[in-house]
């Protein structure tokens, strides 16, 4: 460098803009984590409000217990670990809401609190926090309490109340069968005679509008569908996962001789397909991988529903496929730009 140029650089008083050094890729998105989480919470809000309107205090208690436990657990973890608080990203709020919607409405408050603690502490923070967890936190919390207190959760049927067992005519050696949900009645009837002695088509409208059986989030399949379509329209979730999930459930249910619409609307299929299987962290990164992931969830869900001990298998289907996500991603690594395969002799 010449002496003249060096003096010019030194004497020039130029204030350079502040720069941030980071590794690639340098992509600026319109949406941040908290924005995405709040959109999902907003899409689920009508379902939660409709549940409170129809079920009253029990729905409020369950929602409060789950959300309060997830928020407080994440706050305490960060406090004792001396890490920055992460409640503003909205992920703990969404986990608590999803957990409440995945549990039976009359779940004792202390079980809901335990589920929230397990969801955040065991399934999320122990892995390193948001972005590092392998399994969906809300489903881990639900699975934990379902296994630990299966008998308590099974005794939530209240005669004469809004959450009452339904009874329909059956064939074979039984005059009638009853259960806590329409899925349970259908499974019992199918096991007894191999066919259904009540109309599955007649259950479509109650499941779409006002269903007071099953988990809290099953109160209206119609509201779940609207919320899921909103997230797809806004680009919050990829359509491939819910389409693969729901399409596989419908196709296999029809192949097994059952009403595909009933099997999509009943149980936790819609809640799982739109709001749980689409979790960014626990679903594949590639488009093809997401479609495979959704189809795999639907396949396991239907097999568990028709051949397993429980008529509802959404939780286990998604958790099982969560465990396969690293394998799916590794098998579908996109080809590097400009790379050409070696010619074979």
Image: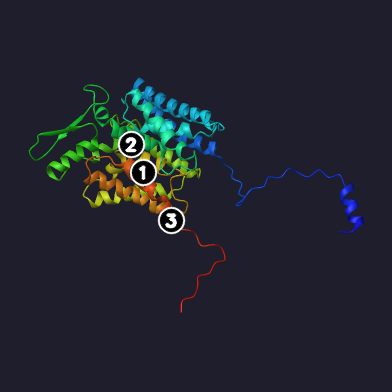
- The residue sitting at 15% across, 45% down in the picture is 195
Q: Which residue is mark 1?
A: 319
Q: Are marks 1 and 2 in contact (CB under 8 Å)?
A: yes
Q: Which mark is residue 143?
A: 2
Q: Nearer the viewer, mark 2 or mark 3?
A: 2
Decide: few, some or many residues near mark 2? Use Cα within 10 Å; few <14, some 14-19, many ≥20.
Answer: some
Q: Which mark is residue 288?
A: 3
Decide: few, some or many residues near mark 3? Use Cα within 10 Å; few <14, some 14-19, many ≥20.
Answer: some
Q: Quadrant of residue 178?
A: top left
How far is mark 1 from mark 2, CA to CA? Answer: 9 Å
User: How far from the left and from the top, in percent, is residue 179?
Assistant: 20, 32
Element class at badge 1: helix
Q: Residue furthest front?
A: 81
In terms of sequence position, does the residue under pointer 1 or pointer 3 come before the other? 3
Q: Which mark is residue 145?
A: none
The front one of 132 and 40 is 132
The front one of 35 and 285 is 285
Side of 266 relative to 229 (left or right): left
């Amino acid at each position: 460098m010449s002496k003249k140029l060096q003096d010019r650089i030194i004497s020039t008083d130029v204030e350079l803009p502040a720069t941030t050094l980071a590794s690639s890729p340098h992509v600026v998105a319109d949406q941040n984590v908290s924005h995405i989480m709040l959109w999902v919470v907003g899409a689920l809000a009508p379902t939660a409000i409709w549940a409170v309107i129809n079920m009253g205090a029990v729905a409020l208690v369950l929602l409060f217990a789950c959300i309060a436990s997830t928020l407080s657990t994440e706050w305490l973890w960060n406090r004792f670990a001396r890490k920055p608080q992460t409640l503003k990203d909205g992920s703990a709020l969404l986990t608590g809401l999803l957990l409440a919607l995945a549990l039976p409405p009359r779940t004792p408050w202390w079980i809901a609190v335990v589920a929230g603690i397990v969801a955040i502490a065991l399934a999320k923070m122990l892995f390193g926090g948001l972005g590092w967890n392998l399994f969906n936190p809300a489903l881990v919390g639900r699975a934990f309490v379902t296994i630990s207190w299966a008998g308590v959760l099974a005794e939530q049927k209240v005669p004469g109340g809004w959450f009452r067992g339904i009874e329909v005519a059956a064939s074979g050696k039984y005059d009638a069968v009853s259960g806590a949900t329409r899925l349970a009645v259908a499974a019992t009837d199918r096991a007894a005679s191999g066919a259904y002695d009540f109309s599955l088509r007649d259950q479509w409208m109650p499941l779409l509008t006002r269903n007071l059986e099953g988990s809290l989030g099953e109160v209206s399949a119609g509201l779940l569908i609207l919320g899921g379509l909103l997230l797809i329209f806004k680009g919050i979730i990829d359509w491939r996962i819910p389409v693969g999930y729901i399409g596989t459930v419908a196709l296999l249910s029809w192949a097994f001789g059952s009403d595909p619409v009933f099997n999509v609307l009943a149980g936790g299929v819609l809640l799982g397909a739109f709001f749980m299987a689409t979790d960014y962290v626990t679903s594949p990164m590639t488009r093809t991988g997401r479609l495979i992931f959704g189809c795999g969830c639907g396949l396991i869900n239907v097999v568990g529903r028709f051949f397993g001990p429980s008529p509802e298998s959404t939780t286990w289907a998604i958790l099982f496929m969560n465990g396969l996500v690293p394998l799916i991603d590794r098998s579908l690594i996109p080809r590097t730009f400009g790379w050409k395969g070696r010619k074979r002799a």
